[in-house]
Amino acid sequence: MTYDEASCLDGAQTAIDCGFDYLMGTVYYDSVAKLLKENGMAYLPFVGKVSGSPSILEGTNEEIIQNAKDLMAKGIKGFDILAYRHVVDGEKLAREFCAAIDAEICIAGSINSFARIDTMFDIGPWTFTMGSALFEKKFVADGSFRDNLKAVVDYMASK
């Protein structure tokens, strides 16, 4: 994970070169937003203070929500929020953020159980991501990555 402007611009250019529709994540920079807009790509930056590896999210719920509102005033139409990486209460933040912000919201980071998937359905973000939980076999302990992914897909299809 990188947080400096040059690295974020490099990532944006790679996304453009690959023909992606969205760039999700990265710390917000005006330069990244401008480059993506010029190339017709949607940008869902992180909100709040994101740092570290693995990433953590700092700031009060109110500060994070205000950060999103400030970015929306700059034309940003969606956000990547590391709710469960919040240093206080990730679920409460996710609920408050989704209720307060009318935008495409992706909840990313630490969606690592069927209970958290259920919470995502309850909260209702635009989308959520899952990564490490599949590699770490959080859903099928003795299964492969594919087995874990299939378990999640089957579970979600049953909802």
Image (cartoon, grey):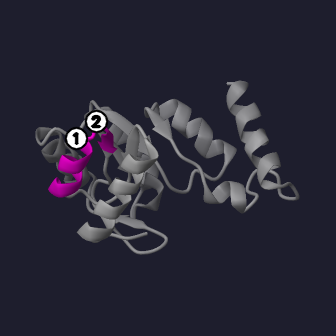
Q: Position of residue 135 (x, y in %)?
A: 71, 60
- Which residue is at a point 55% across and 56% down the rendered structure image? 110
Residue 1 vs residue 154, the one in the foreground:
1
Q: Answer whether residue 76 is magenta in the image.
A: no
Quarter of the rendering occupied by the C terminus: top right
Q: Are marks 1 and 2 in contact (CB under 8 Å)?
A: yes
- Disc 2, SS: loop
Please give the range of residues in magenta. 30-43
Q: Tell me the kind of residue under disc 1.
A: Lys
- Which residue is at a point 20% across and 58% down the rendered structure image? 29
Residue 40: numbered disc: 2
Q: Tell me the kind of residue under disc 2.
A: Gly
Q: Answer whether residue 42 is magenta in the image.
A: yes
Q: Is residue 93 visible?
A: no
Q: Which residue is mark 1?
A: 37
* 65 w.r.t. 122: above or below: below
Horizontal side, residue 5 vs residue 110: left or right? left
Q: Position of residue 145 (x, y in %)?
A: 77, 54
